[in-house]
Image (spheres, coloured by chain):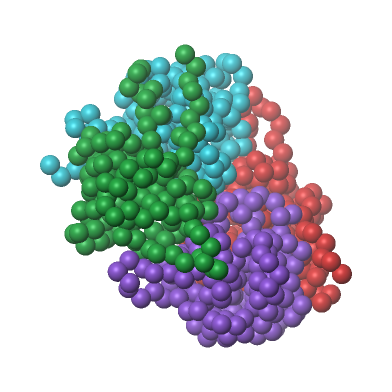
Chain colours: A red, B cyan, C green, D purple
Amino acid sequence: MKTEKSLASKPRIGVVGPGSCPQEISELAYRVGHGLAAAGAILICGGRGGVMEAAAKGAKEAGGITVGILPGDSPSEANPYIDIPIVTGLGNARNVINVLTSQAIIAVCGEYGTLSEIAFAMKCGIPIVGLNTWKLTAPNNRPIPMTHASTPEKAVRAALSMRVSCGVTQRPT
Amino acid sequence: MKTEKSLASKPRIGVVGPGSCPQEISELAYRVGHGLAAAGAILICGGRGGVMEAAAKGAKEAGGITVGILPGDSPSEANPYIDIPIVTGLGNARNVINVLTSQAIIAVCGEYGTLSEIAFAMKCGIPIVGLNTWKLTAPNNRPIPMTHASTPEKAVRAALSMRVSCGVTQRPT
Amino acid sequence: MKTEKSLASKPRIGVVGPGSCPQEISELAYRVGHGLAAAGAILICGGRGGVMEAAAKGAKEAGGITVGILPGDSPSEANPYIDIPIVTGLGNARNVINVLTSQAIIAVCGEYGTLSEIAFAMKCGIPIVGLNTWKLTAPNNRPIPMTHASTPEKAVRAALSMRVSCGVTQRPT
Amino acid sequence: MKTEKSLASKPRIGVVGPGSCPQEISELAYRVGHGLAAAGAILICGGRGGVMEAAAKGAKEAGGITVGILPGDSPSEANPYIDIPIVTGLGNARNVINVLTSQAIIAVCGEYGTLSEIAFAMKCGIPIVGLNTWKLTAPNNRPIPMTHASTPEKAVRAALSMRVSCGVTQRPT
């Protein structure tokens, strides 16, 4: 029972980014996923290609566990590195679930969907770390709660250190 | 029948912005709502306070029709200027519906929820006009499909002229 | 202003049923929609074909207003009798919104989607009236809060008389 | 890598039922969860109390893995036997995700939310096995694709044998 019990207390870290991307972005995402799994985290992602697939591949090659929260209505849409496909059928609205399920988010590069996830993370109080992603200027230049990292390794460390509580109830013994 | 028939072909324009805001932002939102209704548009919004309420008040005082797409599970959460409350129970995920239901969006000022709506609009190909709102810099500085307007009146004109097809099927006669 | 003001206080009644159906079911749905509009109600429905289209046609031909809460991501999916398409992009999850937006629901005939709406109505405390629809037996035969009507006219009367509060806040004068 | 790789190909079976229930129903749910985990399946459930908690407890005590798809916006709402909380913030609309994520569903007893999951399972073509749950009569008495089991063990066997494809793409080697 020891192993399973610890599954619930592993950090759950989200990696968000575009569904297709150039090779150099894939490499960043791979290193993010690898680093997260090496540190014992469960990878949460959107389950599809590009950044999501590269991060999941990195996580699997470091012996980690991967969850893919899919927009469509079939698990066959998951990339081959997803262990647990969550099939939502919700289209873009599933981006909210990626964010709420994670204790911190790393945004790698980014299209518009990624921007929506950055926005929801800030809205929901989930720490967000950017790696080569959107730069934002709020109305009236007020400060915004987003950290930028210069390398995948720094992004992993920042996300793990800033993450919110796992929220898990202790099991009766 | 003439009046009702034309309801389906009226432009549907979304106004998004924070649920509470200072007086000068409320005034901008009021003018946006008033201008949209005066031009014959149906106002789509999130149905709550702040920018949403001011825009809906403006629309009603110009004789318009207002739809409020609510995050909670009761119509009682709507502001008093909403004609048709749509009760979603979806929390922040309802932001996607605000966007998809509109033929163009005007973002007035903006917190994080507004940023998510700007992101979804760009993702879904719905034209987005900003008024005193977020400024965005995409990765690699690629251009982004967002227009900024300097006055409510210019925002209304831009949204109406850029709007996508209403998508409505002609009724058999 | 008088006309628009009263829009918010009109009853909002949902009609749910299959997206394709034989002629005799269409006729029942048409009479339901016509009766609701004649009584001053706004018709809420899923916006597509079959029962939804027949009810919307009936409502329009009685001079009513129709709202179609669509599962897909384009208003072009609405039937031609929808005045206000609400575009959710949520697939089947939009069934929850049909229910929450209505003060009472009439189920005409019914496939599985209709059954989900009957279930959500009971879950959310929205009165549900069945017309030639599912018959349900709960575990342990406990009573269930669903009314069956034998004619469209009786279904309309039952829904209007059982409807929950419109939940609308009075506008300041 | 061997262990993790096989995670993706384990059956994912949903257990649905009320969030609070009498002791004899809890015992049925516990035996369902235990049997599923003993057979190597991952338990998918709504993550809360009652049937969901009893099934998750059974699964954990048989060494299984549990996923809880939560309606609220915090993982703290999960029962203590959930390994991987999926936080949706969608309220009742999350019931669709429980269904789509599962290759077969077992309904134990049942309130209205359970009925909505039975309906969605039939709508989405996910096999559904009932254990002391709703009995349904479709309009015109047409046959419905739902199986009833008389014991937890028979329900587990039926769900495993009827389950649809896991939909998972083979990983490159």
Pick whichever, B73 or C146, lies toward us: C146
Residue A128 pos. (x, y %): 70, 47
**Left or right: where does residue A119 sit relative to residue B1?**
right
Residue B14 pos. (x, y %): 43, 33
Give the residue at x 61% y 50%: D89
Give the residue at x 66% y 82%: D35
Q: Quadrant of the N terminus of chain C?
A: top left
In the rendered image, is residue B16 in sight?
Answer: no
Tell me: residue D64, above or below residue C9.
below
The quadrant in which residue B9 appears is top left
Residue C82 pos. (x, y %): 29, 42
Give the residue at x 57% y 16%: B24
In the rendered image, is residue B40 in sight?
Answer: yes
View extreme (left): residue? B173
**Left or right: where does residue C27 sit relative to residue B48?**
left
Pick whichever, A169 or A136, lies toward us: A169
Give the residue at x 35% y 76%: D143
**Left or right: where does residue A168 sit relative to residue D113?**
right
Pick whichever, B115 or C173, lies toward us: C173
Residue B137 pos. (x, y %): 58, 38
The quadrant in which residue C83 appears is top left
Tell me: residue C29, above or below residue D100.
above
Tell me: residue B119, above or below residue A32.
above
The quadrant in which residue A17 appears is bottom right
